[in-house]
Image: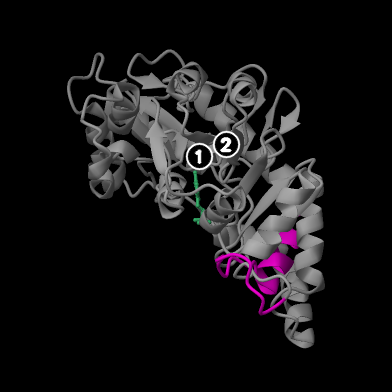
Amino acid sequence: MAVPLLDLVAQYDEIREAVRAAVDEVLETQRCIGGPKVVECEKAVAAYSDCKYGIGASSGTDAILNALMSLGIGAGDEVITTPFSFFATAGCIVRTGARPVFVDIDPKTFNIDPLRVKGAVTDRTKAVLPVHLFGQVADMDPIMEAARARGLAVVEDAAQAIGATYKGRKAGSIGTAGCFSFFPSKNLGAVGDGGMIVTNDATLAEQCTVIRNHGAKPKYYHRYVGGNFRLDAIQAAVITVKLRYLEQWHEARRANAARYDERFAARETIVTPHVRQHNRMIYNQYVIRITDSGGGAGMRDRVVQHLKEKKIGHAIYYPVPLHLQECFADLGYQEGGLPESEAASREVLALPIYPELSQAQQDEVADAVLEAVGV
Ligand SMILES: *Cc1c(COP(=O)(O)O)cnc(C)c1O
């Protein structure tokens, strides 16, 4: 039995009526840019995230870019971030003209190591950009403490973590601003690209709404060079509908994760996700490590080969850490410089975890992984 990494058709089967009705409203009114659906979506996502303001964005990437631009980050500035993330995290920093300063990760959670953040602060540092990877919030208390001591902004890349919590606080609500992505594969996915900035800072929220309209205030009078960073009404309508199901989808993912954890328990070669006690993880991805211990070199890649043959969905997030990406060669990082991130790139493997995954499908995945590592 083939198992996909993600099955959005199965999800759509459950929400078809509601989604169609909401999209139809946009089509019938032709309020396609801005308008009531976008405002409703911004309010709903902000409320869900325990924030006062939500500012829709054209993508998660543009949410991050807008937040950094609105904080005034640019040439000559440094932003401390993790090298183990999707490209957008560092790409946005570079696009503002600032320099990304990569610090290594905590190998247990794959998130930025807060102890290393403090050590990376210089006179040029303007912000810290932690990523809540795979749906688990980074260790925010020491990050916030380091930032406060030096007057730095903290922008949470919460693209994979909407609804996750840290000591009871929602992802996106802890830093100066939080950024969500509604890319279809995220826990809350649109039918195209979309994203949102959330914040409790009224001044920053206002600046984000100006920057997302080419820096115009009022219209056609440009105080800044911004961009077209707007969320469109059809995406907003879909997101508002899907938000009602989000908690139930999170719980289904968490139940699936618990089942995998059980199947993979006590295998020397497989390291299951480590969730800190104070975290509620929402498993945007279920990522295991396949180590070489007991299996020999290249074990992860042999498992990948086996899953391919069995037509079982899987992915490697991420095969090359950001500090070693070709486009960042001029930053001067070398192989071996951030060893925990580099080891993670060699060992990680994401398995199907989507809410509609059946128990039979999940057993198929687990059996195949165990077969490949040699039970
Ligand atoms: C998905 C993602 C983004 C970018 O979101 P898009 O909506 O695809 O632009 C940024 N950071 C992380 C960690 C992501 O997973």
Is 159 placed left or right of 17 in the picture?
Answer: left
For the C terminus, the image quarter is top left
Report whether residue 245 is seen: no
Query: Label for residue 300?
Result: none
Distance between the Cα atoms at labels 1 and 2?
A: 7 Å
300 vs 86: above or below? above
Question: Start and end of the magenta stretch?
Answer: 219-244
Q: Is residue 232 magenta?
A: yes
Percent across and percent down for residue 68 are: 56, 49
Query: Label for residue 285?
Result: 1
The yes-or-no answer for disc 2 within 8 Å of ligand 1 is no
Q: Please rate how many residues cluster around mark 2, counting C-alpha atoms within 10 Å: few if below 14, some from 14 to 19, many from 20.
A: many
Is the Cβ of the residue at disc 1 closer than 8 Å to that at disc 2?
yes
Q: Nearer the viewer, mark 1 or mark 2?
A: 2
- The amino acid beneath tag 1 is Gln
Q: Residue at x 24, y 41 (%)?
A: 305
Q: Residue tagged by mark 2?
A: 135
- The amino acid beneath tag 2 is Gly
307 vs 44: above or below? above
Please identify the quarter of the rendering in which residue 345 is found.
top left
